Image: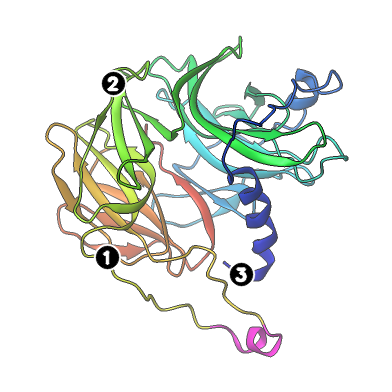
């Protein structure tokens, strides 16, 4: 990622760092001046969505064709807001996305909140789907099987009476559409992914016993949690679990683990970038890899290796998937052959969705 994006990354990291302690005082409910109408006003109206693939680019949603052609900007986010990630509903009639808001309280300018908005695919009409209190960051939405609720990662910022930052609390939370009723499903965990049949929930849980995260699978209410796939050595990080369309496997983007390699060739800068002193920042850390894990027995298969970013989305037919390679743009991977091909020129994409569940 280039320097001009680092300030955004730092802003995001403020929301997602730290740990709670016994002296923590959770922040109060959002003040009365922040009402539902105010929040809904940030959700965007667009043109109808008539292309199968969407990506996040420069804080907005862009759309493109199956072959990577005719890429065009769909949203124009309002000033000081940022679209972070997105997810299609199971019936593919609504696209949910996480929207980072500008600071609400000028006395706490670093305190960020994120809401979940939705776009009607047929009309482009935007609406508010889920929201929390001041300091709640809702992200990584995944739709329940009936499309009547969303499972999200909620990070709740904790401050004291002097507005000092003390840490945050993460949880997988279910929000009912319409009622906005919030139900904590799994404390201390992130990145929910509901199975295509709507019966199981995958998520990432920090494993304090081994010091590394675990991919977990459970019932929708969080009961009967079981670890899925236990590599040796373990993965140092797990993000973006994605169910295959048939529900038989889950693809994850990981750091470390068996066969992990480092390095990676950074993109060559243009002459004018070198002249101006532009540098490529190591914002993404070490290279990542993609693994496919069979749900029935936890068998693990490595796929694309030594890539940057690596967020994925399945083709609805389950034969290919797309993934983001920060140095090579948007890539298509064919499971049967292992063939990879670039669909777009190099861009710093934030997320990708391919009309899948």
Q: Marks 2 and 1, how far apart in space?
A: 33 Å
2 or 3: tag closer to the N-terminus: 3
Q: Marks 1 and 3, how far apart in space?
A: 25 Å
Q: Marks 2 and 3, how far apart in space?
A: 40 Å
Marks 1 and 3 close (CB-CB < 8 Å): no
| Residue at figure coordinates x 61%, y 9% from the top left | 179
Q: Is residue 44 among what the camera can see?
A: no
Q: Where does the image place residue 53, in percent across and percent down from the top left?
A: 45, 45
Q: Is residue 100 among what the camera can see?
A: yes
How crowded is the residue under tag 3: few (<14 C-alpha within 10 Å), some, or many (20+)?
A: few
Q: Is residue 268 left or right of residue 41?
A: left
Q: At numbered mark 3, what does the secondary structure look like: helix, strand or loop?
A: loop
Q: Where does the image place residue 40, in percent across and percent down from the top left?
A: 73, 25
When asked about the image quadrant of residue 236, the answer is bottom left
1 or 3: tag closer to the N-terminus: 3
How crowded is the residue under tag 2: few (<14 C-alpha within 10 Å), some, or many (20+)?
A: some
Q: Nearer the viewer, residue 353 or 195?
A: 195
- Residue 332 forms part of the magenta stretch: no
Q: Nearer the viewer, residue 252 or 163?
A: 163
Q: Is residue 289 left or right of residue 328?
A: left
Q: Which residue is mark 1?
A: 260
| Residue at figure coordinates x 20%, y 42% from the top left | 229
Considering only vertical position in the picture, is 135 above or below 336?
Answer: above
Q: Quadrant of the N terminus?
A: bottom right
When asked about the image quadrant of residue 15, the answer is top right
Considering only vertical position in the picture, is 251 above or below 42?
Answer: below
Q: Residue furthest top?
A: 179
Q: What's the magenta region?
A: 269-277
How crowded is the residue under tag 1: few (<14 C-alpha within 10 Å), some, or many (20+)?
A: some
Q: Which residue is mark 3?
A: 2
Q: Which residue is mark 2?
A: 197
Q: Nearer the viewer, residue 4 or 15?
A: 15
């Amino acid at each position: 990622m280039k320097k001009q994006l680092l300030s955004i990354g730092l802003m995001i990291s403020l929301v997602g760092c730290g740990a709670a302690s016994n002296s923590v005082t959770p922040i109060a409910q959002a003040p009365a001046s922040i009402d539902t109408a105010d929040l809904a006003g940030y959700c965007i109206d667009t043109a109808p969505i008539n292309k199968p693939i969407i990506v996040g680019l420069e804080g907005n949603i862009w759309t493109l064709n199956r072959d990577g052609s005719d890429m065009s900007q769909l949203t124009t986010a309002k000033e000081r807001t940022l679209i972070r990630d997105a997810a299609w509903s199971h019936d593919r009639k609504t696209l949910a996305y996480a929207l980072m808001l500008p600071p609400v309280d000028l006395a706490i300018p670093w305190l960020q909140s994120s809401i979940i908005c939705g776009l009607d695919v047929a009309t482009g009409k935007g609406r508010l789907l889920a929201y929390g209190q001041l300091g709640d960051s809702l992200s990584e939405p995944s739709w329940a099987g009936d499309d009547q609720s969303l499972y999200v990662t909620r990070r709740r910022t904790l401050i004291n009476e002097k507005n000092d930052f003390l840490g945050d609390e993460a949880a997988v939370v279910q929000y009912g559409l319409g009622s906005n009723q919030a139900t904590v499903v799994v404390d201390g965990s992130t990145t929910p992914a509901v199975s295509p049949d709507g019966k199981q929930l995958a998520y990432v849980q920090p494993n304090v016993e081994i010091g590394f995260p675990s991919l977990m699978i459970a019932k929708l209410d969080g009961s009967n949690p079981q670890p899925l796939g236990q590599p040796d050595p373990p993965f140092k990080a797990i993000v973006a679990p994605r169910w295959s369309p048939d529900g038989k496997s889950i693809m994850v983007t990981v750091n470390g683990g068996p066969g992990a390699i480092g390095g990676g060739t950074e993109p060559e800068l243009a002459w004018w970038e070198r002249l101006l002193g532009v540098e490529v920042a190591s914002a993404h850390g070490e290279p990542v890899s993609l693994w496919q894990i069979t749900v029935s027995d936890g068998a693990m298969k490595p796929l694309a290796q030594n890539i940057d970013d690596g967020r994925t989305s399945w083709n609805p037919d389950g034969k290919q998937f797309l993934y983001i390679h920060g140095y090579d743009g948007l890539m298509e991977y064919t499971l049967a052959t292992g063939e990879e091909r670039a669909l777009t020129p190099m861009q710093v994409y934030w997320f990708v969705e391919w009309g899948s569940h």
